[in-house]
Image: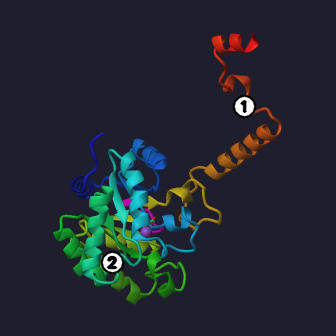
Amino acid sequence: PAKVTVPSLLEKKLLRRPISAITAYDYASARLVDEAGLDIVLVGDSLAMVMQGHENTLAVTMDEMLLYTRGVRRAVKRALLVADMPFGSYHTDDRDGLANAIRFIKEAGAEAIKLEGGRERTELIRRITAAEIPVMGHIGLTPQSVHRMGGYKVQGKTMEAIDELRTDALALQEAGCFAIVLEGVPRELARIITEELHISTIGIGAGPDCDGQILVLHDMMTMTFSPPAKFVRRYADVAGVMRKALEEYRHDVEARTFPADAESYHFSREVRELMTE
Ligand code: KIV
Ligand code: NA
């Protein structure tokens, strides 16, 4: 199967072929994602919550994001590898934002970066794309805005908010984004934006009319510890599988039924003979 690239994703919009995307943060799961043929692997800053146990995404640093991205890079052969700019890495000024985007490409092998925000980010996005780095936008429920939003709430519910998000989507396209994540917005708004753009919309909690879909791997696999959001479909119960295996292992160790003789190494015949002399 051919390598997924920014041009091949732009073409998918024209051909109306859905784009499949998911997060991954480590070598093993990224390998499974890539081998399953998904189009986009995002090293999301959601790793702050699902990998590091933070309350929200704000704490994760550039250096930590680079560390996770490098592991994923070694696994991914076909999918497009997108790295998420963490909170603080592009909020000081555009110079810092560009420098941090470059770090993801140079130091971790990402092929594109993602950042949150609308019109207020277009100057930065122009600079990053001018440096030959493809940018994915992200509007709607932007988790890095948790304190401004007062929690994780569906966005784009008033006429004013709807107009603002439509304007933001067009501004991001104009600034050079190759795709935009629409998170936590009414299905109807996601549909309107998807029809208005010639770049792809990738939805999460944005309904079925987007050009693509993305989920957090740990949510869809059930490797999380609280009830899922409405938009999460549970495709597997990995936590259940792991819990059962761990309890069995513990039982076997305590009952001395693990390891068995067949799972042990043995002296060679020569050593055995010398020992019995
Ligand atoms: O960090 C993340 O996982 C994301 C996706 C959910 C879009 O930003
Ligand atoms: Na994110």
The residue mark sitting in front, 1 or 2, is 1
The image position of residue 105, as x and y in percent, is 28, 60
Q: At 49% across and 73% down in the image, what residue appears?
A: 57
Local crowd size for mark 1, using a 10 Å CA cut-off: few (<14), some (14–19), many (≥20): few
Q: Is residue 32 left or right of residue 261?
A: left
* Residue 211 highlighted magenta (yes or no): yes
Which quarter of the frame holds ligand 1?
A: bottom left
**Which quarter shows the N terminus?**
top left
Vertical arrangement, residue 109 with respect to residue 57, above or below? above
**Which residue sits furthest left?**
130
Q: Amino acid at mark 2?
A: Tyr
**Which residue position is annotated with label 2?**
90
The image position of residue 6, as x and y in percent, is 24, 57
Q: Say if disc 1 is inside 8 Å of ligand 1.
A: no
* Residue 118 highlighted magenta (yes or no): no
The image position of residue 231, as x and y in percent, is 53, 65
Report the magenta residues as a range: 204-213
Q: Amino acid at mark 1?
A: Pro
Vertical arrangement, residue 227 with respect to residue 30, above or below? below
- Element at badge 2? loop
Local crowd size for mark 2, using a 10 Å CA cut-off: few (<14), some (14–19), many (≥20): many
> Looking at the rendered structure, which numbered label has been put on residue 259?
1
